[in-house]
Image (spheres, coloured by chain):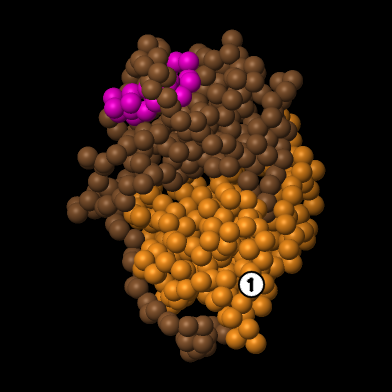
Amino acid sequence: MSTILVVAEHDGGKLNPSTLKCVSCASKIPGATVDVLVLAADSSAVAAQAATVAGVGKVLAVDNPANAEAVAAVLAPQVAKLAADYSHVFGPSTTFGKDLMPRVAALLGVGQVSDVMAVEGPHRFKRPVYAGNAVLTLEVPAGDKVVATVRVASFEAAAAGGSATIAKVDPGVATPTHTRFVSRSGATTGRPDLQAASRVVAGGRALGSADGFKLIYSLADKLGAAVGASRAAVDAGYVPNDLQIGQTGKIIAPELYIGIGISGAIQHMTGIKDARTIVAINKDGEAPIFEAADLGLVGDLFAIVPELEKQLG
Amino acid sequence: MRRIIVGVKRVVDYNVRVRVKPDNSGVVTEGVKMSINPFDEIALEEALRIKERGLADEVLAVSIGPADAQQQLRTALAMGADRAVLVQTAVVVPPLSVARIFRKLIEKEQPFLVLLGKQAIDDDNGQTAQMLGGIWDRPQAVSCSKVEIADGKATITREVDAGLEVLEIDLPAVLSVDLRLNEPRYVKLPDIMKAKKKPLDVLGLADFGVSEASPFTTVKVEPPPQRQKGVMVKDVAELVDALKKKGLL
């Protein structure tokens, strides 16, 4: 039988939605028991939240001042130690999980399955390769511990309604001091989170400047949408890096994606192809994004976007 | 000798439209343009800049791959690496084995920094730096967008979902680099000529006692499901209408 440990992503006070996706992915393995591991300075708030997630059997809570910030080198030996009792260890394929999980796998002496997009069996998974231009189905040997990151855009969030027990545990391992958290800065915009939003408005280089990008923000606010960008727009300095969608940025799966002035390079399309509806607005009717768009409109974005905002009322 | 090791992987070029083989065993790589993994190029550029700032004496470029990976190592030497090592193997070496090979090279070469790309654009695993950090028991910084080195320490800015994170790490350490760290230099013709004279050692996997076998079995490789082309609308009013019909507004 599969016993799965999901490593929770959180900010010290709140569980990140990526954890709900991991629980959902883990629950796809028939007959699996799913436990959640919360590593924090004070785990109580996050552990209590994790305990309410449907499908979770037990929450393991580790309190340690060293865990105040998620530093992979500090967390990895604790996860590896607690993984001993489990057949599978899952983390989200967010920057948190991408940083941590391979280090855990290496400490356990096993390979890692990156970006699980579908579960085919307890040891068989699908994952994207070549920027999503091919899908690999692979099998982990039956006797091996499975360490995997979960492509969060591929799974629904696990529902609420669980009542798991919370167990305080002490992994009893030394944590290194060679890696020290200094600071984190990010735009606290008040807008929805790009990876969790049901609507996303994204802009490309055609916006022309940071000032031009205001059109995107304005439309997004009208729709209650998150703001995203192509790599070209980020590289040009119109918007910060955390807005980048694509192979090396964020993979999103909103209900509605509106790409404005985005041509649709393969690397960007990788990030949006799980969107339920793709709308493309571009002056070039030959732009590749129209090949994948459900609704396309050719024209000058500087005329179309204000008009669209107006017609939304 | 203050040394930096840089990983250089030979991959299908960024601009190639990858096709899945008809027998679903993999993707077509025969007759396809191959290049240095773009993230590795950024790692190499950063190593060269650190050396140019007088903070390192030697940049060693390492590739693990087929005999043809010598081409990518020659490019690395032309960019400015001082010497190169190819660990030659005909099979694809999985990330944990790559990390173990680097671990053995570290024992021999004693670098203060190992710079790798944050992922290779073929298998998109994004694991090697973190795995090396784990088995080496040294700091890792993943997706670096800024690297500052002073007094046996490095201050790293790295790209995270929330924005940017700053870490202070002791050296030696392993870093994986992100796109915005720098813009790699172009190789000039005289540098290509000079690179031919730089040392390039070819070793075998047997020299490392590391298994190249993948821990996983490939069941199949398929093309991704394609999205169908939708409809073109003629103006904003039609677009708003269509969105309303889909229940999206």
Report the front residue among A7 and B125. Answer: B125
- Relative to A215, does residue A248 appear above or below in the rendering? above
Residue B212 point in image, percent of width and height: 35, 31
Q: Quadrant of residue A293?
A: bottom left
Q: Nearer the viewer, residue B168 or B219?
A: B168
Chain A drawing hue: orange
Please state, as top left, top right, bottom left or bottom right, where the C terminus of chain A lies in the image. Answer: bottom right
Instruction: Residue B43: give x, y in percent of width and height.
Output: 53, 32
Residue positioned 31% across, 51% down in the render: B17
Measured along the vertical axis of the image, is residue A304 above or below residue B158?
A: below
Q: Is residue B213 left or right of residue A169?
A: left
Residue A4 locus on image (x, y percent): 53, 55
Q: Quadrant of residue B4?
A: top right
Which amino acid type corresponds to the residue marked 1 in the rendered image? Ala
What residue sits right under mark 1 in the picture? Answer: A220
Q: Which residues are magenta?
A: B65-84
Q: Is residue B75 a member of the stretch shown in magenta? A: yes
Q: Residue at x 44, y 61 (%)?
A: A264
State the hue of chain B: brown
Q: Residue B177: in sight, yes or no? A: no
Placement of B108 over or under A64, stated as above or below? above
